[in-house]
Amino acid sequence: MKDLHRAFHDHLAQTSPHPLALDIVHAEGCHLTTRDGRRYLDLVSGLAVANVGHRHPRVVQAIKSQCDRYLHVIPYGEFIQEPQVRFAERLTGLLPPTLDSVYFVNSGTEAIEAAVKLAKRVTGRTRLIGCRRSYHGSTHGSLSLTDNETKKYRNRPLLPDVAHIRFNDPGDLELITTEAAGVVVEPIQGDAGVRIPDPDWMRALRQRCTDVGALLVFDEVQTGFGRAGRLFAFEHFGVVPDVLVLGKALGGGLPMGAFISSRDRMALFTHDPVLGHITTFGGHPLPCVAGLAALEALQDEAMLGNARRAGALFKELLVHPRIEDVRGEGLMLAVDLGDAALVQRVVHGCLAQGVLGFWFLSCPTAFRIAPPLVITEEEVRKACGVVMECLSRPI
Ligand code: PLP
């Protein structure tokens, strides 16, 4: 057998020339441990996945128990599988009545693809609207809605009939016309460097979609499941989407996505054609039990309140002449330094001191702070101390 690092580079397809290549042997709560015994305070959460902390005991126990019952038994939707049904029931119980039907898939991008199909089915239209600086995933449909040209130009042609409006720009809402099937929006833009829209714009967006008969699709893959200090970010704005798209933290650390809408809309997938959307593994029992256990932990252990308090403490402590802005809600934060080279130095400086921060896809001047929602006050203070020390080093 080759040395692990050698095999990692030789045989695992890579997506960047210089991966961090931390060799993880253990993860728990807010910490990652590498083979050489180093312990890292995780401000990334596997990219907004480990919201309840790594290996939450309730999640681990739920997975172990389900392993003793059954794993995959049939493609989505054919058999009654208690984990799917109970998780869907629990999720819809937390949502407005118009979001009462859940379709589980395997990832965020897959959920976006399916949500877009639903918008086309419901409206009989083809035009899709996304927002400038958005990110919705890496498959062709999601990439078409994404507005990051550096990720798109090698993959054209993408979906036809897709337009982008400016996020948070009231004037651009006029571009949503009666030709639009759906408008796909992150209620708080994540990879654009955490951008929070004006609640008035959100309400006007909702109204415009209603007026022209387009489905409003909220991509809460990153914001959902408590990340932004509420279970779903749309709760910050008092605006209910027609389709809610979830992923990342939804499966409690296992791969899972979902799109949620009304039963009558979802019923369109049952005819003309039958099996209008299908997936082999979507709703696999392991992510379903893990997701339900994570949801129960999130609620029973008051993690939303902790996310809001910890987020406020980060904002209070991260004050430095080199910090231009700390944006965000809950524990979905961007620390903007206005300088991409400085971001590189700070992220790598923090890593050397055992604090793992990370970049954004479309905002090189900022780094992200998105720790598990269980982070303690002491851990927040430690993380901020390391960031401030890195920022204070002479250039
Ligand atoms: N939508 C948003 C807002 C995301 O942040 C992401 C991933 O970062 C996706 C969709 C795609 O999710 P996945 O990577 O699970 O396909």
Image (cartoon, rainbow, N blue to C red):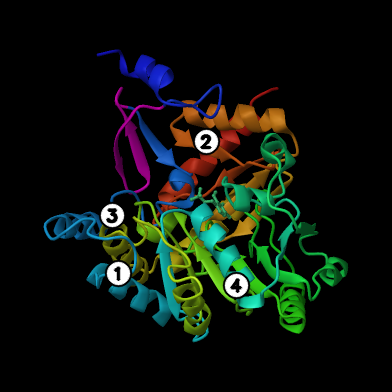
Look at the image and give the residue range highlighted in magenta.
22-37
Q: Determine the CA span between mark 2 and mark 1.
A: 52 Å
Question: Residue tagged by mark 3?
Answer: 56
Q: Earlier in the sequence, mark 3 or mark 1?
A: 3
Q: Could you tell me residue 240's position as x and y percent?
A: 60, 79
SS state under label 3: loop
Closer to the camera: disc 4 or disc 2? Answer: 4
Q: Residues within 10 Å of mark 1 (few under 14, many from 20)?
A: few
Q: Quadrant of residue 12?
A: top left
Residue type highlighted by circle 4: Arg
Question: Residue tagged by mark 1?
Answer: 78
Q: Determine the CA span between mark 1 and mark 4.
A: 22 Å
Does mark 3's beta carbon lie closer than 8 Å to ligand 1?
Answer: no
Q: Earlier in the sequence, mark 4 or mark 3?
A: 3
Q: Determine the CA span between mark 4 and mark 3.
A: 39 Å
Between residue 334 and residue 223, name the one nearer to us.
Answer: 223
Instruction: Please tell me which residue is depicted at 77% across the width and 80% down the height of the picture.
Output: 212
Between residue 157 and residue 249, name the one nearer to us.
Answer: 157
Residue type highlighted by circle 3: His
Question: Residue tagged by mark 4?
Answer: 121
Q: Earlier in the sequence, mark 1 or mark 4?
A: 1
236 over 107 or under it: above or below: below
Identify the residue at the far bottom of this view. Answer: 97
Q: Residues within 10 Å of mark 3 (few under 14, many from 20)?
A: many
149 over 269 or under it: above or below: above
Instruction: Please tell me which residue is depicted at 33% across the width and 48% down the height of the picture.
Output: 54
Q: Determine the CA span between mark 4 and mark 2.
A: 51 Å
Q: For the residues labelled 1 and 4, say whether their Cβ atoms are less than 8 Å apart.
A: no
Q: Could you tell me residue 227's position as x and y percent?
A: 50, 60
